[in-house]
Amino acid sequence: MDAFEKLIENVKVLKEGEDLNFSSKAMETR
């Protein structure tokens, strides 16, 4: 169970990181 929860946490962090990168790129293109 711990490993599974860790995996979900990692996915959440990755998704947030991608969203941040996307936002940064969107700001740069403007």
Image: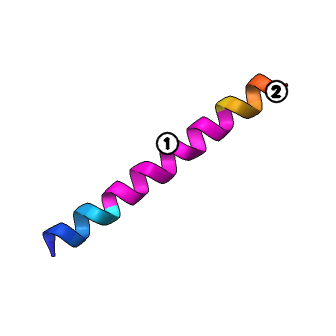
Residue at the spot x=40%, y=49% of the render?
A: 13
Name the outermost residue toward the bottom. Answer: 1
Say what amino acid the circle numbered 2 marks. Thr
Picture colour scheme: rainbow
Residue 25 lies within the magenta run: no
Q: How many badges with numbers are in the image?
A: 2
Say what amino acid the circle numbered 1 marks. Gly
> Which segment is the magenta one?
9-23
* Left or right, residue 24 beside residue 3: right
The residue wearing badge 1 is 17
Position above or below: 4 against 24: below
Residue at the spot x=49%, y=42% of the render?
A: 17
Q: Residues within 10 Å of mark 1 (few under 14, many from 20)?
A: few
The residue wearing badge 2 is 29
Q: CA distance from mark 2 to mark 1?
A: 18 Å
Q: Dot 1 lies on which element?
A: helix
* Left or right, residue 8 beside residue 1: right
**Secondary structure mostly seen in the magenta stretch:** helix
Residue 22 lies within the magenta run: yes
Name the outermost residue toward the left. Answer: 2
Which quarter of the rendered picture does the C terminus lie within?
A: top right
* Left or right, residue 22 beside residue 18: right
Q: Dot 2 lies on which element?
A: helix
Residue at the spot x=29%, y=64% of the render?
A: 7
From the top left corner, tell me how far across and down residue 9 is, in percent.
32, 58
> Disc number at residue 25?
none
Mark 1 and mark 2 in contact (Cβ < 8 Å)? no
Mark 2 / mark 1, whichever is N-terminal: 1
Position above or below: 21 against 1: above
